[in-house]
Each structure stands twice: as structure tokens, then as C-alpha cells.
Image (spheres, grey):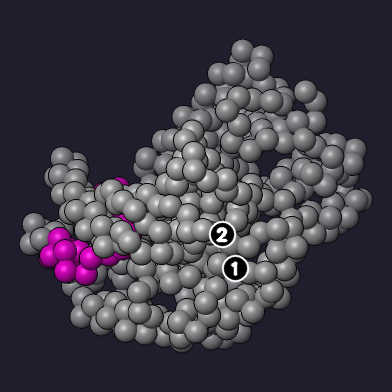
Amino acid sequence: MKHTIDVITMGCSKNLVDSEQLMRRFQAIGYDFYHNPDQLHGDIAVVNTCGFIGDAKEESIQEILDLCARKDDGELERIFVMGCLSERYLQDLKAEIPEVDRFYGKFDWKDMINDLETESASEANMPEVIEKAQQSTLHTTGHFAYIKISEGCNRKCAYCAIPIITGPHKSRPMEDILDEIERLVKDGVHEFQIIAQELTFYGVDLYHEQKIAELIEKIAAIPGVEWVRLHYAYPAQFPMDLLRVIRENKNVCNYLDIALQHISDNMLARMHRHITKDETIALIKKMREEVPGICIRTTLMVGFPGETEEDFQELMDFTRDVKFDRMGAFAYSEEDDTFAAINYEDDIPDEIKQDRLDRLMALQQEISAELLEKKVGQTCKIIIDRQEGDWFIGRTEQDSPEVDCEILIPASSNTLAIGHFYDATITRAEEFDLYAEIKH
């Protein structure tokens, strides 16, 4: 099928936002497209790659190689590659995978429209295409949307390659974000995941002060915004007024995703996290005091260079004491050109990294089961995401799509609408999921 493109997004929701912007441009010049299809539909495939950690890079490369094999078999005519991996390893990828027709980085993918050499996307009418695309409300997630409020990061943690890939923090103007949300509300979207590499730094570059609290308060004031959920905060220099905004606005979810990475002062210093153990504990205490019932999601890292068994046990004790509502963890992998790669020896054997990761996640599994069991008998507001077989699948305000707990409601006794909100009573808990009945 001519004029049909398959777009495959790897990695995080920030990449998904870029893919959606690209597809809006395809739409503006008359292309059909499919996102993450089970099978290819068109003669062109675009891969939006991830370059964050080793596993993600390998997954992106494997996807490209699989598509190259299909191109060799005549199933595809062209392959375009964009995103973080391409931004960072452009010349290496060009040399190693010549079957790819064109590589783009993290930001120059917008040139792809011109490079397709379609008559409708000539340089003369590109401003019209861009304006039309910006007014489109196309998104891939149906009843909820990801809103990226900034690019880049100024924090420069020792292990992280993101600042190398994306550059310094760059906030979107507040009016642009509010306009986008207003358009999406008119299109039927009522749940918004506010995302950034570093959420709490929002506005410093444009307005010379942290403006995340003001932004979220203005988003919450838009009629039709039902849920606003915050992702990827940073603990150092945390803007405390944001807690007031969460507490005072019912449509701002009692939820905060804040990556802590570790707790021992030794590790926090070596990681360049700019915060201490005592300050971290005080921050969590303050969050729970200011926003009763807040759901805190965090990410932790094991196996960073120099991590001793004592450091790891300190992390285990901290996790056991704090009892995070949601937690993810990963083992350190050395990333080229980062401070850690240049200055530290990756001295923790892989088997020890994996053992520590397994022990930490087993502990979190116990904590999750304990916390979810306490929810049995409670009634809460949920949104319905989809139906799978005999079950409707939903979420509470304390659950973000794809990464958190899901609620299962029997389809046999309910007729529910996808994307609608209901009151549900929790009837049973498992380690990471809940079961419920709709309250009639």
C-alpha cells in the first residue's frame, strides 16, 4: 500500500509523544499510518529508538535488524530510524546497518516529511503542514494522553546518558501546553499524564524559577480535565508548593513518580544525586504529611560502581521501612561518556547485580501485596481502559497506565464503557492487581 507508514515506538512515553507528533505530520500530508502494528501494512517503516540503558538499546537494534530482513524479503521498500539511539550513535549505526535508508536523531526527525519527497510536503508548504499538524489532536492512547512539558535535563547524574542525548533542560511555553490540553479535552480526553525527564525543573529556563506548581494548577482549572498525574520528579530542590496543588485540587491525582535511585549517602554522592539520606527521608515524610494518602512511585538502582553489601542492605532496610506504593528497579549498566563510565570501574559482577535486583524486587512484591490487601472493602473512582476476555480492566487515580496496578471487574455482570469513570468496591487483592465490583 503506497502512502502507508508503520511507526514503531521503543522505550518510554516521552518517545511516544515524539511519535505522535510525527504521525500528526503524516496525517497532515495525507499519509495513512499504523502505530506499533502486529503486522506491517505499508511500504515504509519508522523506528523510534530508545538509547537509555543496554537492554533498551539491544531491543531497538534488534527491531531495526528484523525490519531490514523484511526489507530484503521485499516486504518493505524503506526504513527510517529516529530517536535517542540514533541521536547518540548516528555514525556507528550508519556504518553497521547500511540497509536503513535514513537515520534521524532525537530532534531532526521533523525533516522526515521533506525527505519523503512527497509533492504535498514541499518546502513551500511545510509551514502549512506544521501548523495543521499542531492543531491536530491525534494521540495513540485513546482516552488518556501523555503531555511532555520539557526536553532534556540539567541534573547530570553520574550514570545517566540522557543529558548527553537530549541536551540541557528546555521547557515548553506554558500557553502551548494549556492549549494542547484544551484541544484534547474537546476531543474527548480527560486523563493526562504530565511527563518530562525532570518534571520539577519546569520553567527555570523560561521564567527563571520553578513553575511546575503553577502549571499543574492551571491545567487542573481547565474544564473537562478529570485526572492529572505527575511523572519523573527529582528529589533535590523539590518545589514544596506542588504538594499544596496536589492536595487542594481534586482532579490532580494523589500520585507522584519520583526516582530516588538509592538511599546510602555513599551511593547518593557517587551518583551525583545532590541529596542526602536524611534529606530524602524528610522529603518523603513531608509529602505524606502534606498530601494524606499520596501514592509515591519510585525507581531504584542496584549494582552501581562501589556499591557494597552494606550499601545494598541500607537500601533494603529503607525500602522495607518506607513501603513505597509503587516501585521499579534496575541493575546499573555502564553508559558511554557518562561520568561513571569515565571515572568509575564497573566493579560489581553481573551475577551480584542480578541477585541484588531479585532480592529488592521480592521485597517490593511482599510490600505491594500487603498494601493492596488493605484496600479490600474500599470504594474508589476508577477509569476503564479495555476489556480482555471475561474482564474489564481499569485503574484508580493511584495507577498510571502500563506500569502500575490494574483493577479487574467481571464483564459477565457489568456493561462498562471504555474511557469512562465508575465507582468500584475492591473485593480481592493479589500481589500487583486488584479485583472489584462496580458500585451501582
- Which residue is painted at 51% across and 30% down in the image? 63
Viewer can see residue 400: no
Work out which residue is located at the far top of the displayed protein and give it. Answer: 73
Mark 1 = which residue? 226
Distance, label 2 to label 1, CA atoms, is: 9 Å
Residue at 57% from the left image edge and 23% from the top image edge: 68
Q: Could you say which is closer to the camera, residue 266 or residue 132?
A: 132
For numbered disc 1, what is the local secondary structure?
loop
Occupied quadrant, residue 146: bottom right
Q: Does residue 17 appear left or right of residue 281 in this picture?
A: right
Q: Secondary structure at mark 2?
A: strand
Q: Identify which amino acid the numbered label 2 is placed on.
A: Phe
Asked whether residue 50 is drawn in magenta, I would say no
- The residue nearer to you, when weighing 282 against 305, is 282
In primary-sequence order, the first of circles 2 and 1 is: 1
The residue at which mark 2 appears reads as 421
Left or right: 379 with respect to 134? left
Task: Give, as a single range, the part of the protein colored magenta.
Answer: 314-335
Image quarter where the N terminus lies is: top right
Packing grade of label 2 (10 A; few <14, some 14-19, many >=20) is some
Number of numbered callouts drawn: 2
